Image (spheres, rainbow, N blue to C red):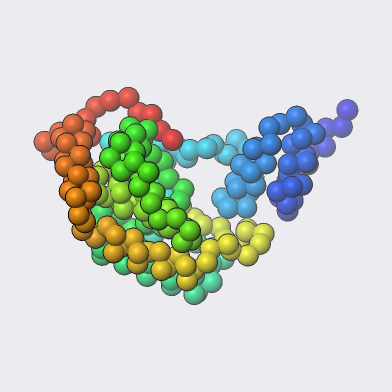
Amino acid sequence: MSTDKTNLAGMSRDEIALELEILDEKPFRAKQLWHWIYYRGETDFDKMTTLAKSLRAKLNDGYEVVTTSRYVPGGGQVGVDLYRRTLSRCANLLLKACFPIRGLKEYTCGYRAYRVSFLQDALAIFGNQFIDLKGMGFTGTVEKMIKARLMRARVGEVPFTLRYDLKPGLSKVATNITTLGYFVLIAKYIVYWGDIGQEWKRKIGERYVRTYDEKGNLRAGPVKVT
């Protein structure tokens, strides 16, 4: 029996899926591996954990949402052209100005960890409007962070390096549509609009008292993450 190892780096998603099919692995593994190799730049299978240790550690420090960040010490980006770097940085600064979260610099990165209890509460408060803006690029990532801010959740971030140089194809992000979507989100959530906004505000206040102590620390409880 051959003991040669197959190098998956450089393969397309379909080619990776074929290799995994030979090994009798489930089809969704191909998507996971493709993401780790081309978006995270990781080729060591032992390090391909669904949730990074740094994210788990931050959640255990009393945060409800932890995001990865290019803008903190230890983070960065490789292979991103000046236009996209500038546009992304300006978008994050604008979102920071409109929806300030203490200590947070990265609003647009989608690699995050959430406590299950936070997501359950978000769905209880916002229902189907937890992610309300659809069809406008990658705005859902930002909308979830805005909802975390509305809920007064403790949000933290850990360093992350975006390896855009390892991406095999062109970006699917339509920057003009996504940028427009950010302005729509600002208009929708810069204040609590109408009766539904006041209902959200009431539920959020009740949740905060239930979830945080008088010092603003998350009340003790089992950590379940997703």
Residue at the farthest top position: 222
Residue 82 appears in view: yes
Residue at horizontal 76 percent and vertical 35 percent from the top: 21
x, y percent for residue 110: 45, 51
Q: Quarter of the image containing the C terminus?
A: top left
Residue at horizontal 28 percent and vertical 64 percent from the top: 187
Residue at horizontal 42 percent and vertical 68 percent from the top: 179
Left or right: 17 in relation to 59: right
Closer to us: 183 or 208: 183
Residue at the farthest front position: 195
Left or right: 16 in relation to 34: right
x, y percent for residue 33: 64, 43
Residue at horizontal 31 percent and vertical 43 percent from the top: 126
Left or right: 109 in relation to 169: left
Tell how many labels: 0
x, y percent for residue 173: 53, 63
Choose top left, top right, bottom left or bottom right for residue 203: top left
Choose top left, top right, bottom left or bottom right for residue 93: bottom left
Choose top left, top right, bottom left or bottom right for residue 134: bottom left
Residue 66 appears in view: no
Q: Quarter of the image containing the N terminus?
A: top right
Closer to us: 218 or 190: 190
Residue at the farthest left position: 214
x, y percent for residue 171: 58, 63
Residue at the farthest right position: 1
Closer to us: 171 or 105: 171
